[in-house]
C-alpha cells in the first residue's frame, strides 16, 4: 500500500516523464507558426494582429496570413495562442526568449503532460473507490467470519 506522499508523487512523476519525452525530437511549425507571435501580440499590443511582425511575415512569405482593414492576421484560430499566453509571459518575464518553435514545443509538451495527469487523476478516482469498496467488503467478510468462528 502506498503512503499519501507516494500517491501524491505519482502524478508529479507522470507529468515530468510525459513533458520530458514530448520535448525530445523535432519540432515542425506550419499551421501554428503564428501562435507564439500572436500570444506576444496579445500580451504586449492587446490585439491579435501581426502588424508588428513585418520582418517575420516577410521571412515566412506571408504564409497563412490575411489582411483585414489594413491589419494582418493569421487565418487560423487564436486558441493555441491563448493556451500559450502563460508560458510566453513567464518566459519573457524571466528574460528567456527561445525560438518560437521551441516555445511552441514547450507549450505543447506542458499541455500534453497536464492532460495526462488529469486523465490519470480521473481514472484513478473510480479505481480507488472500487478498491476501497472491495477492501471494505473483504474486511467485513473476514471479520464477520472470524468473529463467528
Image: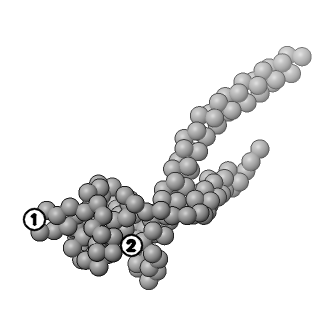
Question: Residue 69's mark?
Answer: 1
Q: Is residue 33 above or below residue 99?
A: above
Colouring style: one colour
Is residue 85 in view?
no
Camera-side mark, 2 or 1: 1
Q: Please identify the quarter of the rendering in which residue 141 is found.
A: top right
Q: Position of residue 56 (x, y in %)?
A: 32, 75
Q: Please identify the quarter of the rendering in which residue 46 is found.
A: bottom left
Classify residue 12 as left or right of residue 48: right
Q: Position of residue 26 (x, y in %)?
A: 55, 64
Question: Residue 89's mark?
Answer: 2
In percent of the image, x 74 and y 48: which residue is there? 2
Decide which of 142, 23 is in the foreground and name it: 23
Decide which of 33, 20 is in the foreground and name it: 33
Kindly report the distance in space between the C-alpha atoms of the residues bearing marks 2 and 1: 29 Å
Question: Residue 96's mark?
Answer: none
In percent of the image, x 64 and y 37: which residue is there? 128
Amino acid at each position: 500500500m502506498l503512503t499519501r506522499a507516494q500517491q501524491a508523487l505519482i502524478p508529479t512523476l507522470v507529468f515530468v516523464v510525459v513533458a520530458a519525452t514530448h520535448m525530445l525530437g523535432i519540432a515542425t511549425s506550419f499551421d501554428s507558426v503564428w501562435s507564439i507571435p500572436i500570444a506576444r501580440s496579445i500580451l504586449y499590443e492587446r490585439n491579435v494582429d501581426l502588424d508588428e511582425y513585418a520582418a517575420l511575415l516577410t521571412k515566412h512569405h506571408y504564409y497563412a496570413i490575411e489582411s483585414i482593414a489594413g491589419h494582418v492576421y493569421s487565418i487560423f484560430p487564436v486558441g493555441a495562442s491563448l493556451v500559450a499566453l502563460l508560458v510566453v509571459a513567464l518566459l519573457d518575464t524571466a528574460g528567456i526568449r527561445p525560438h518560437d518553435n521551441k516555445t511552441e514545443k514547450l507549450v505543447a509538451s506542458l499541455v500534453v503532460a497536464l492532460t495526462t495527469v488529469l486523465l490519470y487523476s480521473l481514472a484513478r478516482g473510480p479505481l480507488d473507490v472500487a478498491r476501497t469498496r472491495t477492501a471494505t467488503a473483504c474486511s467485513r467478510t473476514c471479520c464477520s467470519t472470524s468473529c463467528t468462528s
